[in-house]
Every structure is written in C-alpha cells, then in structure tokens.
Amino acid sequence: MKIVYLIADGMGGWPLDALGGKTTMELAQTPQMDDLAANGIVGVAQTVPQGMQPGSDVANMALLGFDPSVYHTGRGPIEAAAQGLELAPDDLVWRLNLVSVSKLTIDGIMRDYSSGHIATEVSRPIVENLQKKLGNETYTFCPGIQYRHLLIQKDGANSDEAALHINPPHDITDKSIKYDLRAFSRCPDLWDLVFEAKDLLHDRTFNTSKANSIWPWGQGSPLNLPNFEETFGLKGAVISAVDLIKGLGHASGMSVIDVEGANGLLDTNYQGKVDAALKFLEENDFVFVHLEGPDECGHGGNAADKIEAITRFDAKIVAPLREALKNEEIAWIVTCDHFTPIAERTHTTDPVPFLLNGPGCPSSKVDAFSEDTACSSGLVLNDGYTLLSYALKQFGLK
C-alpha cells in the first residue's frame, strides 16, 4: 500500500455574506475530494497547539506527525534546513521578507508582505547586495526564493533578539507596523540593520522593485526533527514550491523533490507536481504534496481566486493522481494546514477538515468535503500531530 497525502494550504475558511453564507471551500468545484470523503472518514484536527501562532510552519510540522510544542523553534530555522545551511547551535535564524510599507515609522502601514510577489530573479540580487553592503560578523543575509529569505544572527540564540515577537507580515496587511517597530527598537543593532536596509532599498540604482523594507521575523535556533522513516516506517518525500515544507522534509530525512515551475501561486506547475509524485511512488511508500495557492489567495482577500485555487487543486492535483493510481492500492489523506479566511486575510487557529480514504475506512456518506461536513462528523483530533498516526492505524499500517 502507498500513501498519498495532499495539502491545500489555507484551504479552510469562514462563511461570507457576499457568498450567500458559504465558504470558498463549499463553493469550489471539488468532485474528487467529495467522492473521497463520501467513501471514507471525515473529521477535524487541531493542527495549531494552544498558545502557538497559526503559521504554516507549525501546522505542517503537525501534519507530518511531529508535535510543534516539542520540536518547533521558529519559521526561520525550518527554511534554513531547506537551504542546507550549516548553522552553529547558538545561531539565531530569522525569516526575512522583502516587504512594502507605506513608511518605516510608527504611523506606517504594512502594504504588501510579498512586494507584489516579487520574482526570485529580482529578489535574489537584492538580498545578495544587502549582504555585500550590510553583512558583517553578526548578520548574514541568505537569499531564498521570491519574497522569502533568511537572516542569520551569529551567537544570537541567547540574545535579547531571540525573545522579540515580530508579527508575520502577512498577518498585518493594511495594518499598523507600530508594535513591530517598537519591538525592533529594543535591540539597537537589529534596529540599525532594518533602517540601513531601508535606505539601500530606496536607492533606485540598487533596487527597482516594490520592496522598500526588510522584515525579520520567525526567529529561532536550528531545527532538529526525528527521522521520518524511523518514526513511521515509511520512505517518504515532500513536494512543494515553498522552502518551509522543503525544510521540514530535509530536517526529517525525507526526500525533497524540486519541481520546475512550481511557484506557490495560481499558475504553478500542477502537472509537474503530479508527475513527480507518481515517479517517487513507483519505488517508495509515501508522498506529501503541498499546494500553496489557496493560502496566497486568502492573504490577498480575493474570494474568487481562492475558489479557483481550490477548484484547481481538485482538478489538477487530486483528479490526475486518482486516475493514474486507480489500479493501485492507495490510501489517501487530504486536508489543509490551517484556515486562511478571506475576511481575516491571515491564518487562524480553527481545527482543519480532513478526509481519509483507504483500507479500513468506513463510508461517511457525506455529500461533500467541507469545513461543515467534516465538523459535523464528530471526529475531532485535539492534537493535530496525531493525524498521521491515526490514519496509519485506520489503514492497518500501525
């Protein structure tokens, strides 16, 4: 038996009056997920432990079977693992966004957490130049992809900076940055770095993109996860456009498959992800396929685009995988990591809907896969990191 684990990032949401009291998940065309749900188990899982921030880092760590309250150190360290960076135990790793703010003052507003979804070929030279101009014995700028980069603070794990709470920029779109600037101001070296970077980014000979500030956040010490194969007895891979999923894969000893053209947006390379999953499953047990699109549309506050993203997930990921594997013994897990409601434009801690379809799974007979049908089943996993173990037990694999 092989296991296909499909994640539509941020797919869950809340009913909207403008949509007739429906959610975007309910309005999306999802015949494949509906069929899997009707002939399998549905329920909800609390992927974000109480007291933790509802980020994709926390939630996807839980979906892979690792308790975030035990293993999570920060967003930055996960993405550093994706890049294979060599870190000292006392290093502090920051996620670094290139952002657009109205102005970098206490009455400034976060305009765009992604600087217009800046392309990697544009952002990478910017970060490389920041390193040349501002990098020093304490701070190292590490280029990543699109707006997602890293800042390494040498020997920072025990510094005042380690305890700072900086809002994820996608949590404060069109909101004040006052709280965060006050936090930065408590650490003079970091404060100086942020403002020196702002001055460089305003130099149009240095930068012609929408990015006008750096935003360090999600800091933590290096990540250490148990080995996935040793823990679950499955040889697995992760497939995603985003570094945090790749980082979780690298840190747990899974295969990490890069797909050309996978970009985390509506126009991602769906077929490339499908082909990569099928190829891996020819000789292996488990594949975790992650699609970022619904989450990005949720952050954008665009209901029509989010409906389209969920519809494409069903039609371009779930459907071709089911067709290609119809003669194989396959167990399916389909879910999202967290909600990204249109009204909030950021993540929430709501328990997420999931479906299990495979050996040992009785028919739920629900008429669709949605937040409501999953919740009405009465099956609740209060510790979301147990979802994978629960599924393996249902499938007779544990």
Image (tube, rainbow, N blue to C red):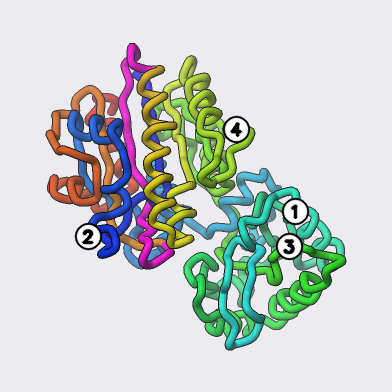
Say whether marks 1 and 4 touch (CB < 8 Å).
no
Say whether marks 2 and 4 touch (CB < 8 Å).
no
Q: Which is more toward the observer, 110 or 235?
A: 110
In front: mark 3 or mark 2? 2
Residue 180 position, x and y percent, is 56, 79
Query: Badge 1 is on which residue?
Result: 122
Say whether marks 1 and 3 touch (CB < 8 Å).
yes
The alpha-carbon separation of the residues under discs 3 and 2 comes to 39 Å
State the residue at coordinates (40%, 24%). 321
Q: Quadrant of residue 109?
A: bottom right
N-terminal label among 4 and 3: 3
N-terminal label among 3 and 2: 2
> Mark 1: which secondary structure?
helix
Number of numbered callouts drawn = 4
N-terminal label among 2 and 4: 2
Which kind of residue does numbered mark 3 sit on?
A: Ser
> Mark 2: which secondary structure?
loop
Residue 189 position, x and y percent, is 73, 78
